[in-house]
Amino acid sequence: MPSTSTQTARPEAAGIQAAAELLAKPLLELVFEAATVHRQHHDPRRVQCSQLLSIKTGGCSEDCGYCSQSAHFDTGLEKEKLLEEKVVLEAARNAKAGGADRFCMGAAWREVREGKQFDSVLRMIGSVKELGLETCATLGMVDETQAQRLAEAGLDYYNHNLDTSRSHYDKVVTTRTYDDRLKTLNNVRSAGMSICCGGILGLGETEMGRAELLAELAAMDPQPESVPINRLVAIPGTPLEDEGQVDWADLVRVLAAARILMPKSMLRLSAGREQLSEEAQAMCFMAGANSIFVGEQLLTTPNPEPSGDAALLAKLGLAPLSD
């Protein structure tokens, strides 16, 4: 079981500078260093596969500038009610049959509220756990009591991304603060759950901002067990719809730096993977990425076809952890 505390102090300047120096290295030199670190802590032939299901879509009161599910923006997304428990359980069975070993449930809530819907989610977690899958949820902010209830229901991982650096955060989100994010992470850790926490590239951040984000994640004690690195999928109707796509080399660079700074974490190549070539994905795996989302959709954004993922992993000599 993880430690019951997580350091939330801002990273020291030296930590940010160290991350910046890694990002500034020649790409192939950086990837070689990251690949060496990766092999010291992980089986380089294995990839952890998760599947993510939106169990409650749209209508979120947060104003995250990248998100199709925010009630503040007109993205054409229809608001949906919380899925029935039997629907979620069937999706989890299909995910396991498709090779996933972790099932993630996401609800477009600003924060968890006590009541029938939360009780239903707790039952979903228990049912998915009984299938032999690891469980993960992202439900917004949680207090100490709610985190404890999630842990008691059988939740293994709680996802709560920092998204971007502290210095850039209020340019992306104004309805919550960076410290709100860290408080939830503390509550999750105190309840004994593992943390899934990463960020998104392409939110208008600078390279130093990326270094700051990496340093913030790496300064957590213990470090997050799972670190998703997302590449912005620009959604029409959101404030960030006109942001240019992050170059694949910049994505590889951030993944490599993350692997060096967080050697034991599962490093997940997440949103935006559908737009990457096979060659770029291969470089990401070489740089230390060892976790992906499988299935055709990530909440509301597209994901590579399962058959394509299977073919790519076979081509690269990689296999899911569940094999």
Image (cartoon, helix red, strand yellow):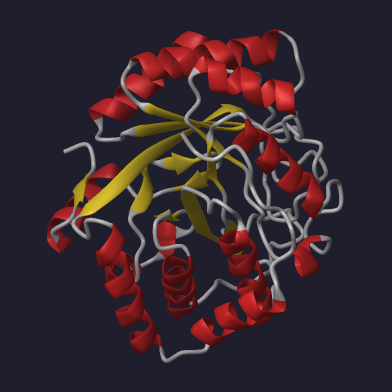
Residue found at x 53% / y 10%: 123
Q: Position of residue 302 (x, y in %)?
A: 46, 47
Residue found at x 34% / y 65%: 288
In the depicted structure, whether residue 80 falls above or below residue 223 = above
Q: Position of residue 65 (x, y in %)?
A: 75, 55
Q: How many marks?
A: 0
Among all residues in the image, which is located at the extreme right?
A: 174
Any part of residue 295 in sight: no
Any part of residue 222 in sight: yes
Is 107 displayed left or right of 194 in the figure? right
Is 230 displayed left or right of 38 in the figure? right
Residue found at x 13% / y 59%: 317
In the depicted structure, whether residue 21 falls above or below residue 47 = below
In the depicted structure, whether residue 311 falls above or below residue 95 = below
Is 1 displayed left or right of 290 in the figure? right
Q: Position of residue 269 (x, y in %)?
A: 42, 57
Q: Position of residue 224 (x, y in %)?
A: 52, 50
Is 127 displayed left or right of 21 in the figure? left
Residue 137 quadrant = top right
In the depicted structure, whether residue 89 falls above or below residue 254 = above
Residue 144 quadrant = top right
Residue found at x 56% / y 63%: 218
